[in-house]
Image (cartoon, rainbow, N blue to C red):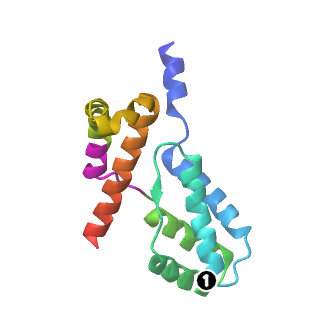
Amino acid sequence: MGSSMGFLGKGVPPTQMMNMVMGSLYKQFTQKAINNFDDFHVAVLDIFNNFNSALPGRHFDFPTPDQIKVCFARWKEAKDEEEKKKLFIEFMSKSVKPSKLDDVTMITGIVSPPAAMAAKRAGENVSQLKLIKLIPDVIFVPTVTILAIVSAKLSRRMYLK
């Protein structure tokens, strides 16, 4: 039993898997007509959009337009298809970075549900907020949590600018 599990656990080597993934990405990339920077930009963003929609949980940050312009200039100067593929794979390997969840978002997501329940219980006793009893907890708590996370992200973006 142990030998069969060891055999099954090896799988595909990581470099071979990466080459296979990058090859299929490049094939998807070249199926689009790329005549100018806008076409190139849309094709790159489409790949990242496919990454983020297909992979559950983890999302990837898009490269900046300046990074894409530099890559497009190098890609356009490439003489043959193999060199273009190499440049594309190098660009994708450099720019595919998982998005990071900041501490503020994490803390807001953890603290918001109990705070929403406490606020609802306190609001039920205030005569002006008696209507809050009509909203079920199943709707109220997630709504308040999502609003708190969105406001935390927006305020953080405004603060960092």
87 sits to left or right of 161: right
State which region is magenta: 98-108
Q: Nearer the viewer, residue 124 or 92?
A: 124
Question: Where on the picture, by quarter, is residue 72?
Answer: bottom right
**Depicted 59 relative to depicted 67: above or below:** above
Look at 53% across and 26% down and name the residue there: 7
Look at 31% across and 55% down and name the residue there: 152
Element on which disc 1 rests: helix
Residue 20's spot in the image, x, y percent? 61, 52
Q: Nearer the viewer, residue 45 or 4?
A: 45
Look at 44% across and 66% down and name the residue there: 94
Residue 4's spot in the image, x, y percent? 54, 19
Look at 58% across and 69% down and name the residue there: 44
Q: Is residue 83 visible?
A: no
**Depicted 39 relative to depicted 97: above or below:** below
- Taking the magenta stretch, the answer to whether it contains residue 102 is yes
120 sits to left or right of 70: left
**Depicted 126 relative to depicted 66: above or below:** above
- The residue wearing badge 1 is 37
Dot 1, crowdedness within 10 Å: few (<14), some or many (≥20)?
some
Question: Where on the picture, by quarter, is residue 51?
Answer: bottom right
36 sits to left or right of 86: right
Q: Amino acid at mark 1?
A: Phe
**Quadrant, the C terminus:** bottom left
- Taking the magenta stretch, the answer to whether it contains residue 10 is no
Residue 158's spot in the image, x, y percent? 30, 68
